[in-house]
Image (spheres, grey):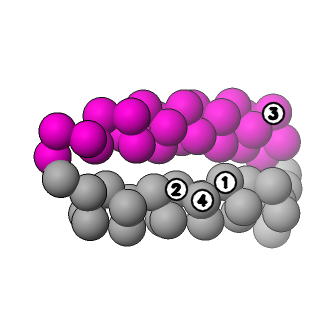
Amino acid sequence: MTTLLRLRAIQLMLVALMAATPKPYRRELEACFNRLDDEAKALAARNPEEVLQ
């Protein structure tokens, strides 16, 4: 669960960066966000009992 929370915390930081970054430069941040989201979903799928705690 700790790893999942860390991934989500990093995603929140990326959202803040995206909000402060000019539009032409957001693409790389969005790609990082999406990769972390995919990793978080895969982690939750592998350990669903940890997500429910």
Decide which of 10, 24 is in the foreground and name it.
Answer: 24
Give the residue pinned by disc 2. Answer: 11
**Number of other residues with Cα within 10 Å of mark 1, as a class: few under 14, some 14 to 19, many 20 or more:** some
Quarter residue 50 falls in: bottom right
Q: Which residues are magenta?
A: 23-48
Q: Are marks 3 and 4 in contact (CB under 8 Å)?
A: no
33 versus 45 height, above or below: below
Number of the front mark, 3 or 4: 4
Give the residue pinned by disc 4. Answer: 10
Q: Are marks 4 and 1 in contact (CB under 8 Å)?
A: yes
Distance of mark 3 from mark 2, alpha carbons?
20 Å
Circle 3: residue type: Arg
The x, y position of residue 15, in whole percent, is 38, 60
Give the residue pinned by disc 3. Answer: 46
Tell me the residue at 40%/43% (across/down).
Answer: 29
- Mark 3 or mark 1: name the one nearer the start of the chain: 1
Residue at disc 2, secondary structure: helix
Q: Is residue 21 left or right of residue 30?
A: left
Q: Is residue 31 left or right of residue 35?
A: left
The x, y position of residue 2, in whole percent, is 83, 63
Q: Are marks 4 and 2 in contact (CB under 8 Å)?
A: yes
Circle 2: residue type: Gln
Distance of mark 4 from mark 2, alpha carbons?
4 Å
Number of the front mark, 3 or 2: 2
Distance of mark 2 from mark 1, alpha carbons?
6 Å
Residue at disc 3, secondary structure: helix
Q: Which mark is residue 7?
A: 1
Let me know if residue 33 is in the magenta part.
Answer: yes
Residue at disc 4, secondary structure: helix
Residue at disc 1, secondary structure: helix
